[in-house]
Amino acid sequence: MTTPTTDDLAAGCHSLVLRLPGTADPQRLLSGAVPGPVRVWQTSVPAGADEPMAEDRRRAESLRPVHRDGPPLRAVALRYADGAVDLVLVAVRAVIPPAALRRIARPAPDGPGDGVPHRPAAARPAAARPGFAHRGGLEWGLGDPGLRGAVGSAQIDLSVLGGQAERLFLPAIALAVSRYGGRSRAEVGVLDLDDGTGEHLRVHAVEAPAQCSVADFIRRFGQAPLTPQEPPPVGVILSPAFDEGRYTACLTPPFPLTVQLDPGSSRAVCRFDLGTVDASVAQRFCAHVAHLAGQLADGAADRPLSGLELLPRAERAALLRAGGAGSAPPVRGRIDRAFEEVAAQQPEAVALLAGDEQLTYRQLDDRADAVAAGLCALGVAPGSRVGVCLERDADLVVTLLGVLKAGCAYVPMDPHYPAQRLRFTAQNAGVPVIVTSAPEFPLVPGTRLLAPSALAELGAGRARSGARPSGGGDDPAYVIYTSGSTGTPKGVVVPHRNVLALLRATAEDFALGRDDTWTLFHSSAFDFSVWEIWGCLLTGGRLVVVPYWTTRDTEEFYALLAERGVTVLNQTPSAFAQLIDNDHRVRGDLALRLVIFGGEPLDVRMLAPWFARHPAADCRVVNMFGITETTVHVTAQTVTPQEVVAGSRSVGRPLPGWSVSVRDERGRVLPPGPSGEIYVGGAGVASHYLGRRELTGQRFVLDEVTGERIYRSGDKGRLHPDGRLDHLGRLDNQVKVRGHRIELDEIRTVLLGAPRVTAAVVVVNRDRPDDPAGSRIDAYVVLEAAADRAQVSRMPRRCSPAT
């Protein structure tokens, strides 16, 4: 048999504090009331009965369980300096149930209480606690494991229920548990200590579908409860009534979150393990139970459950304000004009390093002017979209800036993408010109292919002739295509002002400036490149362009970091994992002061070897969550060794000007703790999906509380009481592999389009679970009996590679 722990013993004990007359004899009161002799421990307290010291001592004594090898009852007389006496009784409920404890508290006028049936002193209960234990956690509790065993408390005001408290309280708790858990099914444990059944647990497991009426939902609690195989994490103790003294049904909460309801009381007491449930989360939960109970009692029996609100409107608004809603002042200007201002301030400073080529800000500005003039010479009108399909080199950055200077939006395409993906992007974006050096770029009717050198020749001598295109911050700056669940990529249109807002939100905090050297490591078709290019050039830094094959060779890239003195590095966690291994072997002299993670979830535990060599005081590490549709970054969390030890999943608080909220499947705001879909608002929200009006309306919505335009991310998250956001993965079938956003359904759709494929499934696998760099996509297909497997292997590659 397992030996009960201290927590087990405390959960199986109850206590009663009685105020006695100063002349009372506690020993005589208990004599004969319990099996065997009972010693009354006498303790003097050097304070009056109503002073804080006395209250602290009473509380401590009433919550201390009996010893596992001792008698089933402990009696302590606390004698105060003012002559008052409190008798504190602590007993094992299985031996001395509430009814027996009540008889002890009601002595006959001339003698001791009538006690309990005599029981041999040597007899002990088989277990000194109820016959159940919940050993798991509570997903939305957000407790601190370091506080395990410490107990917090909160109150639930039930005065609004009047005489209906006992009928409506359990349904209200179940509905709150359902909303917090994000499921229609809810389970609530009930331990009724006043029904004569002893220590038996029953569980109310009910469905709470959105269209169920209030009356039907309440009626279901009259049905027979279940006998659980494992108790749920939230439970209710129905306490017996005690008119005398102060009664505590369980010294520690038997459920991680335990609510005690006394008969006829207008308040319930919630007690919880702080290792499992954060105090502020528990307090909010209690307030939400009361709010739901009030709505259940309002008489609208036919009202659907979906019409009941978990949060009052004022609380929803407060949560949204705390999440940054409404905090975004307008941003003006354009990327190209902002660059020109920087170039005018430091024309001879080095702006770009690409292999042996070096460009100052003046040279980069002049070459970009030539590109803009070349586009004008081709008749490309301002407001057009221009395709750019170039390897990472100086021409890439020059061309992107030149497109913006021409008043156009660039559509980046990775030359390593499949031909069909490139063709689709060009056609869908309607680009009249594609600037590319790729010799095998697929032909697109009505679109002209032009090498960067040819475009520059067209613009030679015309760079500053004619009027500059007019335009503002609302003009599209770029269109980046992301995966789509239907197999069709979608173009995200992002205006200039979004990028400038991103720099305004981060430049001061990250101390970005002229002394920094950045890398352009990522594909221009991946939005991390937006941050790398413009984050560097709009703050006056030096941008080191990393060639494609260098990004694939960790040792070569590491050497480049050391040689160029890179100070700001942006990486996906999977790429940085390989860099950590190389850093451990080479132990080179790096100048890094800031490492920013994005593009995929970060397991902070992988950073332990990095911090062993690079103290957090020397190199700041920041984990950022973001989406193409919200302009690269949304939140920021500085990662320290403390987060590594704790295995934190936090991606931090929203950037200034951005807003974050977590909502349920109906778009209702959730409080800190419960998980749901992450909604993003503020300065980074993109304009729309190009040519996808219906999808735009589904994902970019107006918040009915604030009137703000917000984006439904499809990412799963939860908020902490301090405003930090945990990223918990996706709600759909999308994955991120080495920074690339990939819809597994997109690949599956392509496979199902192959001849004689009857079924397909696509999954992400790793040979080593702790190595994010080893992630790969595996696809499995079922073929007709006579199908040729080689036919599937020869399918055109239509999905972008996860590399």
Image (spheres, rainbow, N blue to C red):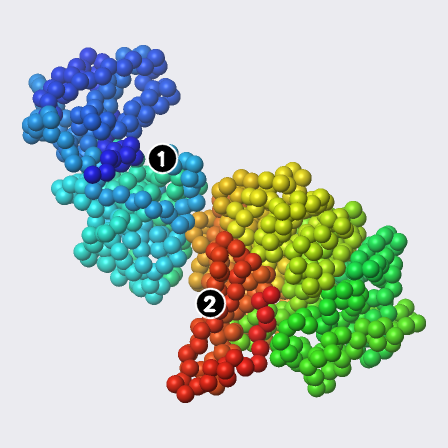
Please tell me whether residue 255 is drawn above or below residue 360 in the rendered image.
Answer: above
Q: Name the residue rendered at 26%, 29% in the picture.
A: 65
Residue labelled with disc 1? 149
Numbered badge on residue 776: none
Amino acid type, callout 2 = Val
Question: Is the C terminus in the top left, top right, bottom left or bottom right quadrant?
Answer: bottom right
Q: Name the residue rendered at 55%, 52% in the picture.
A: 602
Residue 231 placement (x, y as % from top left): 27, 48
Amino acid type, callout 1 = Gly
Residue 613, by quadrant, is top right
- Residue sitting farthest toward the right: 461
Residue labelled with disc 2? 763
Tag 2 secondary structure: strand
Question: Is the N terminus in the top left, top right, bottom left or bottom right quadrant?
Answer: top left
Considering depth in this image, is 528 or 231 the residue closer to the camera? 528
Residue 376 placement (x, y as % from top left): 83, 76
Please tell me whether residue 146 is drawn above or below residue 780 in the rendered image.
Answer: above
Between the residue at mark 2 and the residue at mark 1, the CA separation in whole angstroms equals 41 Å
Structural crowding at the residue carrying mark 2, measured as other residues with C-alpha within 10 Å and reported as few (<14), some (14–19) or many (≥20):
some
